[in-house]
Amino acid sequence: MQSKIKNFFNLKNFLRAIHFIMIVLFLLCIIFLYYYGTNDLFDNKLYIVSGVLFAEAVILVFNRGKCPLEYAHEKVGDKREFFGHFLPDYAVPYVIPVVAIVTIIGFLILYF
């Protein structure tokens, strides 16, 4: 029992949890963007959401489409990409481009 608990609380699982929380944050920002765009709402919260999504985009562009946390995963011996734990291997390379397109469409809905 002790070894199962110790294996659960290792650095690899901690990084996966942090990565998961960040992805949920970004997805909530995209949902918020669509909600505000479809209901013609505009307030200060939208600036925060836009800033978070813009920062994510800049970071991904500078890392050539790869999440910076993937480098940390590699250092602790996690060979699979984060989305490889949930999706089939053939779908993993398309996750970031699809999410980027969905985000761009959300901004277009918001501003037009």
Image (spheres, grey):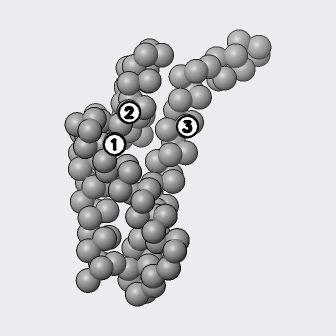
Q: Which residue is at the front of the view, 20 or 42? A: 42
Gap between marks 1 and 3 measured at Cα = 17 Å
Dot 1: element: helix
Gap between marks 1 and 2 measured at Cα = 8 Å
Marks counted in the figure total: 3
User: How far from the left and from the top, in percent, is residue 82?
Assistant: 41, 34
- Residue farthest to the right, as pictured: 2
The quarter of the picture where the N terminus appears is: top right
User: How far from the left and from the top, in percent, is residue 17?
Assistant: 57, 36
Q: Which residue is mark 3?
A: 18
Query: What's the residue type where badge 2 is placed?
Result: Pro
Query: Could you tell me which residue is drawn at 40 percent across and 87 percent down?
Result: 40
Q: Is residue 92 left or right of residue 29?
A: left
1 to 92, vertically: above or below: above
User: How far from the left and from the top, in percent, is residue 59?
Assistant: 33, 42
Q: Is residue 104 left or right of residue 6?
A: left
112 to 64, vertically: above or below: below
Q: Which residue is at the front of the view, 2 or 16? A: 16
Crowd around label 2: few <14 · some 14–19 · many ≥20 (10 Å): few
